[in-house]
Each structure stands twice: as C-alpha cells, then as structure tokens.
Amino acid sequence: MRLATLADGTPDGRLHIVSRDNARCTPAKAAQTLQAALEGWDSLRPALEAEYAALNGGGGQPFDPAEALAPLPRAWAWLDGSAFDNHGALMDEAFGVKAEKIPGKPLMYQGMSDRFLAPAADVPLPSEEDGIDFEGEFGLLTTAVPMGTTDALPHVALLVQINDWSLRKLGAAEMKTRFGWIQAKPACAMAPVAVTPDELGPAWAGGRIHLPLQVTWNGAVFGSPNGAEMSVGFDRLVAHAAYSRHLPAGTVIGSGTVSNAAFREVGSACIAERRAIEMLDHGDARTPFMGFGDRVRMECRAADDTPLFGAIDQQVIRA
C-alpha cells in the first residue's frame, strides 16, 4: 500500500491513497490524516488496503509528487539513529573525534518533529557560513509501541525516505556542549510517498532496505549507497527507542546517513562524508558545503527501477 498527503489548508493535510505506479491517487475514506490512520492502524488497515486495491483497478486523479506534503507533515517524535558504521568510522578517522558509544546500543538522538518539509519545498536557512549539508536516509513510521518492546518489526507500519538537513559548522560546536543539537538540525524533508514494507518485496529483509539511494547535487551524481549495509536493522532501532518509553503511533525513526564500505565506488549521501574521505586521501577537505540556489535530489527506486517513495528535490534559499 502507498500513501501520501496533499495540502488542504490544515497542518496535517489530507491523506490520499496512491496507485502502485505512483501515477494516480484518491482521498482516503478510512482516515482523514496519516496520523489518524497510524493511531487506528490495526483496525483501519484492511479498509485502506481495499481502497488501494480499488485504485489499482482504475480511476482516481493524477498524482503529482511535487504537489505533495511530507506523508506525515508533523509527528509526535523524530528519533534518528546512526546505523551505518562505515559513516561513523570515516567521520571519526577524518576528524579525530570518536563517539563514546554504549556497548550493545546504537547511537540515536531526538530531533525536531513538529514539521517535516514537503519533498519539493524550498529550504530556507540563515547563512551559507553554517555548513549547509544534506543527509540521505531511510526511515519508518511506527504504530504505537509499548515500553520494553523487543519484537519491533510488527510495529513498523510504513517506510519513508528522508533528507535530514544539517548545519555542520554549528553541529561541531553544539556537540562539544554535550547538550545535543538544536540550531544544527533544522526541519527534515520526506519523499512524497510512504509505503508498507510489502511494497518492497525481497528488498525489505532483516529490518533493512536493500536498495540504493540515488543522490544528485546540482544535477551531478553524488552517490548511490545501498541501505543493506545498516549495522543494526530498524527492528533494533525501534526496540532501542522503546526501552524506557512508550512510542506514540506516528513516531518517525531514521537510519542515519546511508553509507557503504565501497564509498569510492558508490559515493556518499552527504557532503560531510565526502569531505572526510578527501581529508583521508589528500589531507584537506576540498568539496564545499551547499550555497543558496543549490539543489539536491534524492530518490530510491524499486529493484525493477519503478517509482517507490518518489523523489526529494529541493533548493536551498536564504531565510
């Protein structure tokens, strides 16, 4: 099943069912918003799936991904992991700052969740001097997760694609305070379509998305790392987040920057990682961060190259 949210003048938008080819859509009858659908997921899913089957049989209206909001325009919680060890290892080695990890526990922080940017929305930011960076990630939306849950995959309702915008020069300073990020982490963006895991077929395995995330910057290919190399799967991330708290339905959990050991062949999903590689190879970082007017595009397509989440395609502008 595929779901999207279109603007209707309200903060949460109007939930729509999207056809399997991402070409058509129709307003959902079983729920007005995605948050409502997630809160009643077990009881509402059969009706939503029936609507999805009917839409795939024909009808509906044209679906323009560029007109969509984020599937979940605001959420109760956004918890971002760092589940690709290769990314962490590169950053640690290049910058000489090793994260103090707790043995057996993944890295995770809680970020801004009251707004997720639309996939084609301009991204207003204060200054080019802040080190503007994109971060291509995969993510998921949960049903309600009880505290202490260890069998987490049944609580994965939908999979999403995320651009976790970062201001790197602010982040370095905020990390030293040990209070976490505030200014360094503005609103993230989501690709237009959220999909149930079965839409991926065998590409969803072990709590991981076994597909590449294709990233271009100002039209030039930047990288296409594969989500299969998560060091811990999404099941572990959900269970980690729920250890001491109940997770409300609609909690968004991110994978962290998608990164592969073969980074020289597949590239990267963020500028900071490329700069880290340049520092290791040449002794200095040569790729600048983003400037106003720059555009980044990210898309993960299915194994047969058909659309899946749709694309995030955004331009950075001066706030």
Image (cartoon, rainbow, N blue to C red):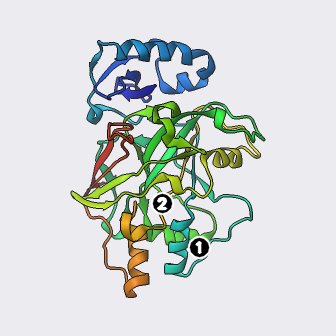
Where, quadrant-wise, is the C terminus in this rendering?
bottom left
Looking at the rendering, which quadrant does residue 52 occupy?
top left
Residue 31 visible from this viewpoint: no
In percent of width and height, residue 205 lies at 56, 43
Q: Which residue is mark 1?
A: 176
Q: Amino acid at mark 1?
A: Lys
Is 24 positioned to the left or the right of 199 in the image?
A: left
Looking at the rendering, which quadrant does residue 6 occupy?
top left
Residue occupying the point 38% across, 58% down: 134
Question: Is the residue marked by circle 2 packed among few (<14), some (14-19), or many (20+) residues within 10 Å?
Answer: few
Residue occupying the point 31% across, 79% down: 286
Q: CA distance from mark 2 to mark 1?
A: 13 Å
Looking at the rendering, which quadrant does residue 192 occupy?
top left
Q: Amino acid at mark 2?
A: Gln
Residue occupying the point 64% across, 33% down: 155
Look at the picture and state if 265 lies above or below 54.
Answer: below
In percent of width and height, residue 81 lies at 58, 54
In percent of width and height, residue 31 lies at 49, 16
